[in-house]
Image (cartoon, grey):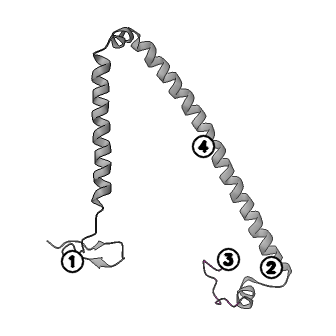
Amino acid sequence: MRSAPAVVPDDRVYSSKQRPSLPMNRDTLSGQMFRSGSSLVVTACAYRLWHGSGPHEITAGEAEGLNTLILLIGSIYAVIFAFVIFVIWGQFTDVENFMMRECNSLNELLRFSGLSIRKAAVASGARSRPTSNMW
């Protein structure tokens, strides 16, 4: 069975047998695994301490009320977060509209001054075809 070519970060195409080995930063990976493991151990210990103590016995009867409180807080947070997203989206739309007005103003300025975009590119010494980094 023939293997499909794989693309590596240098944009060359290699088969799976020719692929160069990519270096891995084992220190970062082991540090993340250590942090995850230690937080899991701390959480397990806290869980064991909580369920073996007296406050757990006291709050066990209030579980339904606590669930309602957590649901209420989560719902309020969701509504506030939705308003934040709405405001940010509106600001992005305002910026897009502002940029469109600026581009139209620049286009009108070039048109009224008698220059086209091609003439402006030639006058500035750029290639005859505008490129993405020209503006």
Task: Report the residue marked by disc 2.
Answer: 110
Task: Report the residue marked by disc 1.
Answer: 18
What segment is highlighted magenta in the picture? 125-135
- Amino acid type, mark 4: Ile
Seen at 75% across and 85% down, the residue is 120
Q: Disc 2 versus disc 1: distance between alpha carbons?
A: 54 Å
Badge 2 element: helix
Residue 36 horizontal/vertical position (percent): 31, 42
Mark 2 or mark 4: which comes first in sequence? 4
Q: Disc 4 versus disc 3: distance between alpha carbons?
A: 31 Å
- Amino acid type, mark 3: Trp
The quadrant in which the N terminus is found is bottom left
Other residues around mark 3 within 10 Å, as few (<14) / some (14–19) / many (≥20): few
Foreground: disc 2 or disc 1: 1
Badge 4 element: helix
Foreground: disc 3 or disc 2: 3
Q: Viewed as shown, does residue 117 lie left or right of 9?
A: right
Q: Viewed as shown, does residue 57 lie left or right of 88?
A: left
Q: Is residue 132 above or below residue 70?
A: below
- Amino acid type, mark 1: Gln
The quadrant in which the C terminus is found is bottom right
Q: Disc 3 versus disc 2: distance between alpha carbons?
A: 14 Å
Q: Is residue 30 above or below residue 57?
A: below
Mark 1 or mark 4: which comes first in sequence? 1
Magenta portion: prevailing SS class: loop
Q: Which mark is residue 71?
A: none
Task: Report the residue marked by disc 4.
Answer: 85
CB under 8 Å between discs 3 and 2 = no
